[in-house]
Amino acid sequence: MKRSNKIFHRLTGRQDGIAIIYIIVMLIPNLLLACTEGYSFTTTMTSLLLPTAFYMLLMTVTRKPGIMMLISLPLMILGAFQIVLLYLFGGSIIAVDMFTNLFTTNATEAGELLRNIWPSILFVCIIYIPLIVLAVRSCIIKEGIEKIFRRRTAAWGATLLLTGAVFAGISALREPDFGIKYQVFPVNVIHNIDLTLKKWDRSKAYMETSKDFKFNAIKEQKADKREIYVLVIGEASRAASWSMFGYERETNPLLKTRKNLVPFYDMLTQANATHKSVPIILAPVSAENFNDIYERKSVITAFKEAGFKTIYISNQVSNRSLIDYFSEEADRRVDINIKENELLSISQPDGNMLPALRETINADTTNLLVIMHTYGSHFNYSERYPREFAKFTPDQAPAVNYRNRAAVVNAYDNSILYTDYVLNEIINILDSTHACTALLYTADHGEDIMDDSRKRFLHASPVPTYYQLHVAAFAWFSSEYIHRFGDKYEMALEHSHAPATTGIMFHTLIDMASITTPYWKPSQSIVNEQYSQGERMYLNDHDKAIDFIKSGVKDEDMEQFDRHNIEYTITEEE
């Protein structure tokens, strides 16, 4: 006991001991990433040696290392953030999409998540709060760090820096994709922060860069009665949990029996983060030309040019993203999500959007486009549905971890059951009008629910999974629509099992309404006889289009692709 007390006093009561603790704690994210990222030996050594050298040299700058420790507080925050994300995703650095989510997520959403991942929050508090206390203690201690310790630490730091540079050089020669800004924490995270800020600046300038854009849209064919088209955007709704797509639980009792409904069995998202996936759904862009989105407007403007009245009904919180800018193109925007103030909101069930839809349809008799952006199955799942839809129980988990997975899955499945009800009610409303109507539904992305040994959770991770990629999607057509535009309905049926991505939604929706524009591609409309998806691309964290099969998916994902008959091609080099 005396010996352990002596060691503790040396580490926490002397400057050299505090410096050693700092170096060890700051390297925890690097050690975890070295275990999770599957780097080569040389890259792993680079990712460990260079940060170690940096922290060692940092401790020799002043006689009181606590000064530099406090200056490096932002690095501690990044380290804590990285550890929490590793708890959620099981791997990967803090991505650009994660930083963008900080800009686009309100405090209520963040609070729902933080309340359920408290073990990771507690862990980082136990690690970093004492480190900050030691930094303050270092500044208060009268004695400075010993000269011999500073000289030895500087010498070792320089040696490790040189050795790390050698390993970095070897990795650069052997691995084309190697880069310190990609593989070495925290350099890679700082690089992603820079990319995030540049991307956010482009989004803020959107109104200026897109102001002169025109679709030159024309409605070529008309029905002999009113036309109403509804696009419903789901949130985090993975196909793997829809009984319509083969899930063993009955989560779609209403939609499965719906007449004139065409499921799209092989639909993949082109991005696993809402701030990218929804704009791809709404605009004439795809993963391949995503950067064109800052100069183009959305499908709402195309319908307006073709003579439609347009309404955007949202259960999301405004966040000044591209989604908000697109919604402002509509003649009217209806917000269901109640704001308490600028940061907090009161989440509403998606069913509360139905009165706004009825009111909109009954307001006049003009041709109408309605975009409905739901809250769907966004975490916290148990707060997404009224209690009468809690079919699968227990559905309340004290914390998100693998031990509580059954309750988490039950809550998620209940949210899908409620989505089934809401979508069926939307169809009932449309059907009751006896107008020429059609509905197109797609989720923006899927969701991980600790489905396999990786124990991945949520979405927007730098590397997607099958569960994030394969999304629920379908179209419904009224009898009046089929009578007038039966060829489009027949093409939807013919292509129901064809490979597709969410990048086709713009082209499909305007084709359903018989609207043409130079930006319309018949080959990208699933209701067109010319439909041909081609290679399916995924938009990665740095907004680069890659074949979804090269996005980092693992053997566990390939098994699910095969199980759900997802079409893909593997080349020899893969």
Image (cartoon, rainbow, N blue to C red):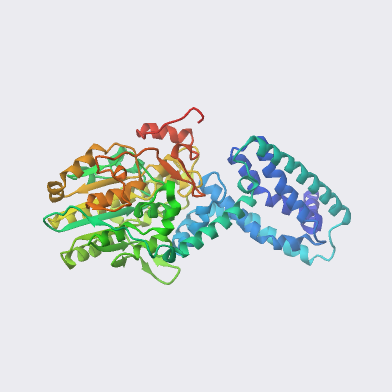
Q: Quadrant of residue 198?
A: bottom right
Q: Residue at x 39, y 60 (%)?
A: 323
Q: Residue furthest bottom?
A: 341
Q: Residue at x 67, y 44 (%)?
A: 47
Image: 315 above or below 458: below
Residue 495 visible within the image: yes
Residue 186 visible within the image: no
Q: Residue at x 54, y 52 (%)?
A: 119
Q: Tell whether 455 sits left or right of 338.
A: right
The number of numbered badges drawn on the structure is 0
Q: Residue at x 57, y 53 (%)?
A: 192
Q: Tell whether 202 sits left or right of 125.
A: left
For the residue pair 412 and 528, the one nearer the viewer reads as 528
For the residue pair 356 and 21, the one nearer the viewer reads as 356
Q: Residue furthest right?
A: 148
Q: Quadrant of residue 536?
A: top left
Q: Residue 196: x and y, percent? A: 53, 57
Q: Residue 94: x and y, percent? A: 56, 51
Q: Residue 58: x and y, percent? A: 76, 56
Q: Tell whether 123 sits left or right of 350.
A: right
Q: Residue 369: x and y, percent? A: 24, 59
Image: 448 above or below 429: above
